[in-house]
């Protein structure tokens, strides 16, 4: 029995950290529709600085220090040293903490569901939340790492929990636009809206509408501002184990509007019934010209994984 547990320990250690994985239908393929897959990794850390590494919901990249920030559903913030060329050359964790309020106290269970993460043009770190809809600015590189600095006033429609389709369908996505400032989106359209009319909200009051994908329960789970000022949206459709799990990367043109709707373009549609080993992708960040990382949430489930995919948009 002693040797069994020893062997199990070494097996776990062998698979801990960062390893290669392949989610594509064919090992020979790297181009698909309008994207090129550059690298694919599985992240298998247990704890970092004593904080459980699981249920990751979004990413933010700070090029000045080559730092990749990750935030989790249970209010955890992680920082990794990363080196990106045409592959993910290095990805090393160096800091983790539970998010805290300005007074140093942790958020209560129903107020810590962090979903969106972004850095603005001045390198300030923002996080959006479900459950208790809010957006806050947090310390990112001081002894107060992970502590809140300021809470931002939301547009009127987004302030009340009862406006969302459920407590768990609030401010899922967050992005920074050099012209429009902080942008956010709910996972599903608000109760007052059609189920397929999704909205991007600027904290400055402007709104943009686009059609959600036709797959059932297609939800906005992340977004990022592209080099040309338009928005890359990550949508996820999951309706059960026997049905297709579909991940869509879609470009939303903010300044090409017809009859109230933004023009959109599908960049990639990854379908589990068409050979894709997709998981619960929820996070997205721009890391260079036309280059992005996206990450999956393992739901703290033995059968799911934390996958980090490095890709390039080709148009």
Image (cartoon, rainbow, N blue to C red):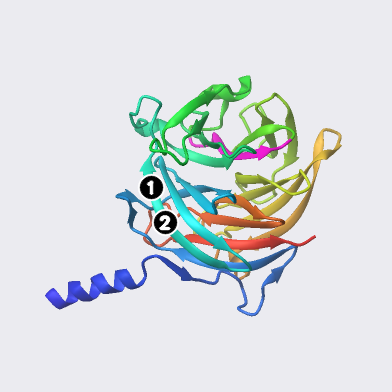
Label 1 element class? strand
Instruction: Determine whether 41 is above or below 3 in the image.
Output: above
Q: Position of residue 310 (x, y in %)?
A: 60, 62
Left or right placement of residue 292 versus residue 55 in this view: right
**Residue in view at x 73 percent, y 30 percent:** 207
Looking at the rendered structure, the number of numbered marks drawn on it comes to 2
Q: Is residue 131 above or below residue 26?
A: above
- In the rendered structure, find residue 40 and report the number of the disc placed on it: none
Query: From this viewpoint, is residue 291 visible?
Result: yes
Q: Position of residue 270 (x, y in %)?
A: 64, 62
Is 94 or 16 nearer to us in this picture?
A: 94
Residue 111 placement (x, y as % from top left): 41, 31
Question: Is 112 a magenta residue?
Answer: no
For disc 2, the marked residue is 93
In terms of depth relative to the viewer, which is nearer, 127 or 122? 122
Residue 206, located in which quarter of the rendered image? top right
- Tags 1 and 2 touching, CB below 8 Å: yes
**Quarter of the image where one finds residue 170:** top right
Name the residue that disc number 1 marks. 96
Q: Residues within 10 Å of mark 1 (few under 14, many from 20)?
A: many
- Quarter containing the C terminus: bottom right
Magenta stretch, main secondary structure, is strand
**Residue 187 visible to the viewer:** no
* Left or right: 31, with 161 as reference point: right
Q: Which residues are magenta?
A: 168-178
What residue do we see at 56% from left, 59% from top? 243
Residue under the point 35% across and 34% down? 109
Where is residue 54? Give x, y as percent.
40, 52
Q: Separation of disc 1 and disc 2 at Cα?
A: 8 Å
Q: Secondary structure at mark 2?
A: strand
User: On the rendered image, what quadrant is the N terminus found in?
Assistant: bottom left
């Amino acid at each position: 029995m002693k040797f069994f547990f020893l062997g199990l320990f070494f097996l776990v250690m062998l698979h801990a950290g960062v390893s290669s994985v392949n989610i594509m239908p064919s090992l020979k393929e790297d181009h698909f529709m309008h994207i090129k897959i550059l690298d694919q990794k599985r992240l298998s850390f247990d704890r970092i600085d004593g904080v459980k590494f699981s249920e990751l919901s979004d990413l933010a990249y700070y090029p000045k220090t080559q730092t990749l920030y990750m935030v989790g559903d249970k209010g955890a913030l992680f920082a990794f040293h990363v080196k990106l060329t045409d592959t993910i050359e290095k990805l090393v964790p160096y800091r983790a903490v539970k998010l805290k309020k300005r007074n140093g106290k942790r958020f209560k269970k129903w107020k810590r569901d962090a979903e969106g993460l972004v850095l603005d043009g001045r390198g300030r770190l923002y996080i959006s939340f479900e459950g208790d809809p809010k957006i806050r600015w947090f310390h990112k590189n001081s002894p107060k790492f992970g502590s809140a600095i300021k809470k931002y006033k939301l547009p009127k429609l987004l302030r009340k929990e009862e406006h969302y389709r459920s407590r768990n369908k609030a401010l899922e996505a967050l992005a920074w636009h050099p012209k429009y400032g902080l942008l956010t989106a709910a996972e599903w359209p608000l109760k007052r809206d059609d189920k397929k009319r999704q909205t991007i909200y600027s904290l400055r009051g402007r709104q943009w509408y686009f059609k959600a994908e036709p797959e059932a329960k297609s939800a906005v789970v992340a977004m990022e501002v592209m080099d040309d000022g338009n928005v890359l949206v990550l949508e996820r459709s999951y309706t059960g184990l026997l049905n297709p799990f579909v991940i869509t990367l879609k470009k939303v043109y903010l300044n090409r509007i017809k009859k109230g709707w933004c023009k959109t373009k599908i960049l990639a549609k990854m379908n589990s019934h068409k050979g894709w080993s997709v998981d619960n992708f929820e996070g997205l960040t721009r890391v260079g010209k036309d280059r992005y990382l996206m990450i999956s949430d393992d739901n703290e489930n033995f059968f799911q994984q934390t996958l980090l995919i490095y890709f390039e948009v080709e148009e």
